[in-house]
Image: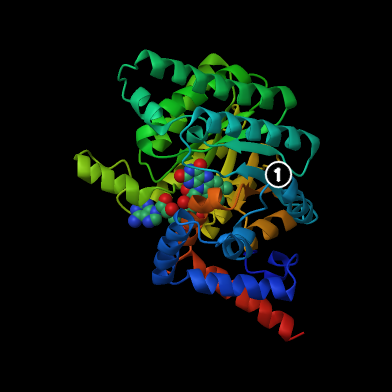
Amino acid sequence: MEKIFDNTEVAFALKNNTELNKAYYLFKLISSNALVKIGTSLTSFAISTNLPVKGLIKSTVFDHFCGGVTEEDCLKVVDKMYTKGVSSVLDYSVEGKETQEQFDHALQMTLKTIEFAKERTAIPFAVFKPTGVGRFFLFEKKGENLPFTDAEQQEWNRIVERFDIICRTAYEKGVLLLIDAEESWMQDAADDLVLDMMRRYNKEKCIVFNTAQTYRWDRFDFVKNTHAVGLREGFHVGFKVVRGAYMEKERARAEEKGYPSPICATKAQTDATFNKTVTYMVENLENKIALFAGTHNEDSSYMLMELMTKNNIPHTDKRIWFGQLYGMSDNISYNLSNHNYNVAKYLPFGPVYDVVPYLIRRANENTSVAGQTNRELDLLDKELKRRRSK
Ligand SMILES: Cc1cc2nc3c(=O)[nH]c(=O)nc-3n(C[C@H](O)[C@H](O)[C@H](O)COP(=O)(O)OP(=O)(O)OC[C@H]3O[C@@H](n4cnc5c(N)ncnc54)[C@H](O)[C@@H]3O)c2cc1C
């Protein structure tokens, strides 16, 4: 497969020199594990004591990784990315909320993004997080088959209703819908709900996508089994396939509670599960499957491109999407779209303080320890040098 991801001219065509320099210094800053740790603690402290740090967060990490505070703010970025064929997934990234009002607000925001998506080809997907619309504790309890109190049962019914309203609206408006995956100890209940939504709304085509985190060794079988149910009952099955974002937490909990870790023992095993799952889905594409590959891994992206070629699937086939996060791996996103593949970037938005947990995850993922930053820095540096030498 031709190596296309090194083309920094294509990757950064939308960034002027000032923006490139700003991105370079931001990645330099968060490449330091120590600085990220200090920054994370200071940010939490500043927010809890009402210190005025909003402006600082906004002009640095927020502007780099988010589209804005409201969905309207995001439109400038959406339109700009789409000039190069890269689509957007508006992601209301407010996390850790606990009250019914907050869950209803998240529901309304998600419905708004569906409405937005319906009006714009540049936004083919909507997305939501299960624990954005209901308490984590209830998902956990449901997954463990523990009995609910009457009040909990009512609260759970409301969660089911919120899921259904979102999925039904997406179905009625013809907007594809991704549902994120989270910690394994709440995921069983979410998986059951999503399966029901697929049953209801994926009869004609794939609208609702679950997420398979392939750092979990059981997820290849999970995808295959879900597909078998779909074939048996006559509905389409969609999966966003990712590696998974909660590895440390998963391992620590398994150890603390003394059960076998659900996470693959090594990175190589996670990679193998990812590859196996994507391969299975591509090879069964004709059998009511749709795939959204959410990854910043170049090898995985090349592998999927190769699989498509091998199976005579056109780059533009609407059943296969590549996905990255806004602010990361532009070399993958823009070079893929330059070769006519379907690409969408998650574009997070929300009030600055409310998206801090999301931003902290991104900062942690980009430290030198996690390893992503060096590539970003090398690419930015390469492009800055290329422009200077012109
Ligand atoms: C569009 C998009 C949507 C996403 N949605 C979700 C979601 O809904 N839920 C979610 O959990 N995550 C989600 N993620 C994050 C994703 O799961 C990964 O954390 C992130 O993309 C890094 O993985 P990678 O494939 O890009 O790159 P890589 O750098 O190749 O992989 C890093 C990942 O490999 C795994 N890993 C690393 N070391 C080991 C080890 N020693 N043993 C076993 N496994 C290891 C971990 O999962 C780690 O995150 C999403 C990512 C994208 C791009």
Of residues 242 and 221, the one drawn nearer to the viewer in this rendering: 242
Q: Position of residue 281 (x, y in %)?
A: 54, 36
Q: Quadrant of the N terminus?
A: bottom right
Of residue 330 and residue 94, the one placed in the foreground of this image is 94
- The residue located at (72%, 22%) in the rendering is 172
**Whether residue 387 is situated above or below residue 90 in the rendered picture:** below
- The image shows residue 290, relative to residue 145, as above or below, that is below
Which residue appears farthest toward the front when viewing the image? 50
Residue 41 falls in image quadrant: bottom left
Q: Residue drawn 67% across and 27% down?
A: 170
Question: Residue under circle 1?
Answer: 71
Q: Can see residue 198?
A: no
| Label 1 element class | helix
The percent coordinates of residue 135 (x first, y second) are 43, 31
Q: Is residue 101 left or right of residue 341?
A: left
The quarter of the picture where the C terminus appears is bottom right
x and y percentages locating residue 190 in the rendered image: 45, 28
Q: Where is residue 152? Give x, y as percent.
A: 39, 19
Crowding at mark 1 (Cα within 10 Å: few <14, some 14-19, many 20+):
many
Image-based side of 312 in relation to 145, left or right: right
Q: Is residue 10 visible?
A: yes
